């Protein structure tokens, strides 16, 4: 059975959470290979696998750097929900979604560490959907210390 275009896009949203939780930086670079990412948290933008940017010393976005740094005794889960997917035409789509990061320190009860939202753009190329933009906003920071 084939997935609908909306389900394919929803899978991309969830794939991001899966890669962040696995601390899979090469996988994240692949996922955003053709995308421009920016954040209300950090000035500037980051482009997928841009070797030129890395060679010029342009830093990766904070979300990649901080989310994939192993921290002793900390486990986390990134949840993506409330996705609203809209199609501009047959090959361009946009999505708005929410995220929640839950963390546990040294086996303690999990707590919400952060909540926010994503605004994404997608294009359909070569039979598959891919990210072309991602802007993220942090709305709530939890009290885990």
Image (spheres, helix red, strand yellow):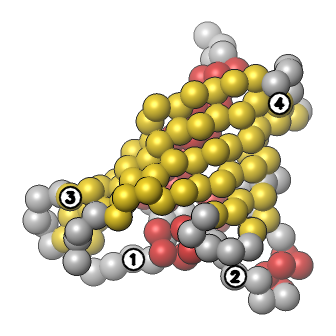
Q: Are marks 1 and 2 in contact (CB under 8 Å)?
A: no
Q: Is residue 27 visible?
A: no
Circle 4 SS class: strand
Residue at image location 76% in from the left, 23% down from the top: 87
Residue at image location 46% in from the left, 52% down from the top: 116
Judging by the rendered image, the residue that carries numbered circle 2 is 59
Judging by the rendered image, the residue that carries numbered circle 3 is 111
Q: Position of residue 13 (x, y in %)?
A: 57, 41
Q: Position of residue 104 (x, y in %)?
A: 21, 64
Structural distance between the alpha carbons of marks 2 and 4: 28 Å
Judging by the rendered image, the residue that carries numbered circle 1 is 70
Circle 3 SS class: strand
- Vertical placement of residue 65 versus 102, above or below: below
Q: Quadrant of the N terminus?
A: top right
Judging by the rendered image, the residue that carries numbered circle 4 is 92
Circle 1 SS class: loop
């Amino acid at each position: 059975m084939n997935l609908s275009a909306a389900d394919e896009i929803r899978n991309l949203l969830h794939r991001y959470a899966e890669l962040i939780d696995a601390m899979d930086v090469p996988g994240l670079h692949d996922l955003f290979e053709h995308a421009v990412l920016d954040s209300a948290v950090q000035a500037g933008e980051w482009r997928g696998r841009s070797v030129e940017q890395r060679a010029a010393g342009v830093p990766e976005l904070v979300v990649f750097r901080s989310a994939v740094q192993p921290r002793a005794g900390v486990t986390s889960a990134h949840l993506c929900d409330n996705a609203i997917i809209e199609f501009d035409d047959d090959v361009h789509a946009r999505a708005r979604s929410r995220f929640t990061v839950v963390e546990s320190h040294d086996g303690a009860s999990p707590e919400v560490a952060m909540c926010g939202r994503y605004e994404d753009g997608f294009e359909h190329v070569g039979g598959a959907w891919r990210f072309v933009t991602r802007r993220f906003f942090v709305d709530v920071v939890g009290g885990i210390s």
